[in-house]
Structures are given as structure tokens and as C-alpha cells.
Amino acid sequence: MLNAVWVSWVGVSPSVALGQPLLRSGVAAGFPSPAEGYQWGSLDLNQHLIQHPAASFWVRVQGDSMVGAGIHDGDLLLVDRALPAEHGSVIIAVVDGGLTVKRLWKRLGKMQLVSEPTTHSPWEVSSDATFEVWGVVTHAIHAVR
Amino acid sequence: MYGFPLESRIFALCDCNSFYASCEQVFAPGLSGQPVVVLSNNDGCVVARSTAAKGLGIGMGVPYFQIRDLVQEHQVKVFSSNYELYGDMSQRVMEILSQFAPAVETYSIDEAFLDFSGWRWEQSEALGHQLRQIVKQWTGIPVSIGIAPTKTLAKVANRVAKGSTGGVYALKEEAIAQLLATLSVDEVWGIGRHHAKSLQAQGVTTALELQQVQPQWVRQKYNVVMERLVWELRGVSCLPLELSPGSRHSITVSRSFGRPVTTCAELGAAIATYTSRAAEKLRQQQLSAGAMQVFVSTGRFATPCYRQSQTVTLPSATNHTATLIQQSLAATQRLYRPGYAFKKAGVILLDLVAAAKPQLSLLHPETGGRSEALMSVMDAINRRYGAGTLQYAVCGKPSGWQTKSEQRSPCYTTQWSQLPVVLAESPPQSKRPYAQP
């Protein structure tokens, strides 16, 4: 019973829309404009990228060990702490008290962090000291110039 | 008349543990479990302590210079307060609570009352645990939740929750008396120092003794507010959401609007009104605020739905209405988005410090009437022609005497230039590479 309610609440995720409408119809009567439904049309990157506003954080990358995953030095990463960290997720982990970006590898009941320094090289297992999951990376923003 | 209450109420108080220190620990996870303290505006006094710092005997409100030796000896990490960060984290916690609880009253930057009425006790307790888990996972902030039939008792229950391992405590009717017997009367929510002394002089020293006095006697001797408190301690709810005695750490004025507000001007007028009210409360208690949070909300059922807040650190602590309004209107302009029907807004004054002496003779109580009149004229002009149209020359432009904040952390969540850095470093060469699966 409680569970059912819980699940429906999870669905209510308010989107923090920051875009502004391009135009709004001032007339309430008459036929709906064919543009109705499209007129709130300024594209809002937050709405596109962020599923859980309260749980989402931006971080900046320093280093090249995740280039194989498309994550470069200086990139912005969007981190969603509401998502579960699964096998293969790119995550932010707490290692030695610092924040690190790695791929999570769950194998034979063990969890390990791996780097992806290049696209084709073997993965490297990071020092398997204890770590905690800080959040799950959902997007990387990379400037191409 | 009725053999049983027509409607039994259940309230929860959700309180963030060591909130400012916890915010710092989220972005510096190496500090988790370590002694951390946060200092007030100007690095004066301790305003937050991590659990480990409390363990060292560092008290709340202690001047920094008194603990300097302790800080060195135990390598306590010291932060200047970063209200921009705390405000943003608070907004996240409140947003989660309002997503998952039916009705929420933001009581202070780190506390919210939730109305669980209509749920059964077991459900409320389970919901409390789920909320606690989800706030911790989503934001990294640990919270404690006290659940009880009234808000006053929820506050008491929260103290028990804080000390417990589960972080959630439901205070049921049969346990109320036993718990109140352990609580001194001056620790009851809403009892000021003055009234506490007077009660103690009458032989009322514990919360249980207060619960058992005749409500009528309390009303005659004190006031109706105090009478309500007695009923609340008895488990009879008299304080609905959005009706609360003041907090000692912050002053909140927030209201739901009578009708939806859509224009920036109207929203600004509401915020200015709340700011004036909050400034009044501030002066009544002879306090000044060092920071201010402004929040606006459409309510969670609105489409489109929007809830956002802005926290500003003031150039210097103040209780001056015009200065506070100027800041809150600027924040409103940044928060406002066209196309939304706003249902609620509020102002929270933070970092409260004793007002050393009135900066301006206008604020002196003796001149109360005239200065109030002057201020309301001034407010009206500023509201009409924009913030800062008319202001005291003495406020001037900040120049060197601004807030001291030598150890402020980055604004991790509100400034692109200050985002947390995550390392992408290759593991040491000695590690054996794995073949790609």
C-alpha cells in the first residue's frame, strides 16, 4: 500500500524550466491555435538533461584517464545522485577523501573502479581501496573549440 | 462531547543534522567523520559543528578565539560561512520533502514541518525512514525526523531522533509523559527565556509539569500563545502548518498567496512585505542578519511547476528594512520567471547576531513612530520606482569593511567557476591492466 503511493510520488518530479516562452496566445476563446503545445518552445537544456533537479550537481573534470569514455580534461559532468550505480555506470566515487570519476565494474559480487585512458586500450583497474559512490554521471559537456 | 478525536493529526519535523557542517562535508568528503566547524559572518562565532567537533566539547555560539588552541590541537577544519552554498542545499532538501510529503512548511533553512495527517502511525514512520534515506542519497545531507500528534511534540520527538541510530522517532501518545519529564521547561519550543524563568519561579520546571498545568491558568497568567503550547504538549494540535513560534537561529516569514501571482511586480511587493515583517521581528529581538534567503514556489501541483531560492550574504550584518528589501527585491528579480502562477513565497533571515548598537538613530526605539512612518514612505517609493531609488547615504558602497570570510568554501552549486573538481587520473603503473572483456 505504502509502496504504491511511494512509486507514484517518485513520478512527480518537478522540472525547473528556465526557458522563457517565445509567444503566448492572449485569447482564451475560439479554436486552439495549431501552434498550441509548441509555443512554449524555447529549448531548455536543464529540462532536457536534468531528471532530478534536487539531486543533480555539476562537476569539472581534471585529468585524462576517462578519455575512452568520452570524458576529457576540463569537461563538465552532470551528476545525478538519485540514480542507482549499476555495472558499467560512469560514477563519481570518493577515493581517499577526494572525488574521482571512474567506471563502476561489478564482477563476482565485487565492485571495482576502472579507468578508460584511451578508446582501445585495456581498462585499468584503479587501486581497489575502499570507495563510496558519490553520484552517477549522466552527461558530459565537452567544448570542441 | 465526542468520545474520540474527530481527526487525529500527525506532524513530522525534519531537521538537517549539523546542517552547515554537513554541506561542507558533502563536497569535501575527506572531512566526513572529522571535526568541522563553521563560523558566523565575519568569522566571529561557531554556528555549526560536525558530530566529531561536538565530541571535542566545542559549544554552539562560542567565539572563535576561544577555541583556537583546540582547533590546532585536533586539526579541526574551520570554514567561514557560505550562505550561498547552504541556501542552495537547503532548497534541494525542501524540494525533495515537498515532492514526497503531502504538505510542507519551511520553518528555517534546515528544518521543515510535514503534515502526515491521514496516514497511519506505521506508515508515517516508514515514510520518515524513506524520506531520510532519500534526502541523504540525493543531497548527501543527513536528517533526523521526529513524528508526533502536534508540532510542539514533533520538535521534542526530533531531539530523540537526533540521538538515535535510526534517525527517526515516532512519539506516540503513551510515551509522551515519560519523555516530557526529562525535558526542562526552557527547552520547550516557543518558551522564551523570560517566560521560562517565570514558570520555574512558579514551580513549573519540566515540560511534563507544564503539560499538567491548567490551560486557563496559563492563559490568564501569560497569554493565549502559551495556552496553545500546553494543549500541544497534551497532544491536541493547535498549530497548523505555517503557524509557528519564532526560531532562535533564523527568522522566517512566508505565506501562501490568496490568489496566484503572475507578475514580477506583484511578487516583489509580496517579498518586500515579508521582508519588512521579518526586519521588524529582527529589531524586536535586537538582532541583525548577515544573510538572507528568498524563495518562490508555484506549489507542486502546478503545471508548469517551479520552485527556486536565492541566498545572499549581506555586505554587513543589518536589521535595516530598506537595505534588506533592496537585497530581497534584487533576488526576486533573479528568481522571477514569466509564465508561472506563483502560490507562495518567503524570506528567511540568517546568520543572526546581536545588534551591537543601532547604526542609525532612526532605528532607536524612542523614535519608533516617526521612523516607522519614514521607513514605510521610503519602502513605498522604492517599491514603486525600483529598489535603491531612495536609500540612506550612510549605507554607501562597500569599501574594505566588508564581511571577513577568510576560509569560505567555493560556491560549488551556484557558480560555474567554482564547481567541484573530480580527478580523472590513471592508476599507478604498477597496476596490472585488465584485458577488455
Image (cartoon, coloured by chain):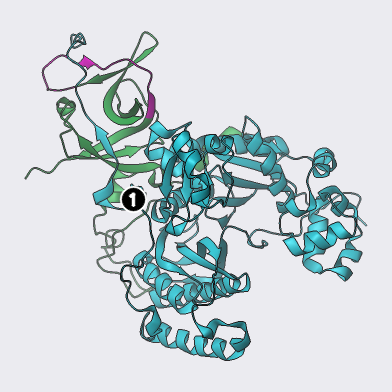
**Does residue B186 appear left or right of residue B368 in this picture?**
right
Image coordinates for residue B13, horizontal then vertical, percent: 64, 47
**Does residue A124 appear left or right of residue B233 in this picture?**
left
Q: Residues within 10 Å of mark 1 (few under 14, many from 20)?
A: some
Image coordinates for residue B358, horizontal then vertical, percent: 53, 77
Given residues B17 and A142, the one toward you in this image is: B17
User: Which hue is chain B drawn in?
Assistant: cyan
Q: What is the magenta segment's predominant secondary structure?
A: loop
x 37%, y 54%: residue: A16
x 57%, y 33%: residue: A3
- For residue B285, what is the image quadrant? bottom right
- For residue B429, what is the image quadrant? top left
**Does residue A7 appear left or right of residue B311 in this picture?**
right
Q: Which residue is mark 1?
A: B411
Q: Amino acid at mark 1?
A: Cys
The magenta region covers A116-133
Image coordinates for residue B281, horizontal then vertical, percent: 60, 71
Q: Residue furthest left?
A: A145
Q: Is residue B12 above or below residue B403?
A: above
Q: Secondary structure at mark 1?
A: loop
Asked if residue B24 is among those painted magenta in the image, a careful observer would answer: no
User: Which hue is chain A drawn in?
Assistant: green
Residue B303 visible in image = no
- For residue B130, what is the image quadrant? top right
Image coordinates for residue B137, horizontal then vertical, percent: 46, 35
Given residues B97 and B145, the one toward you in this image is: B145
Q: Residue furthest front?
A: B69
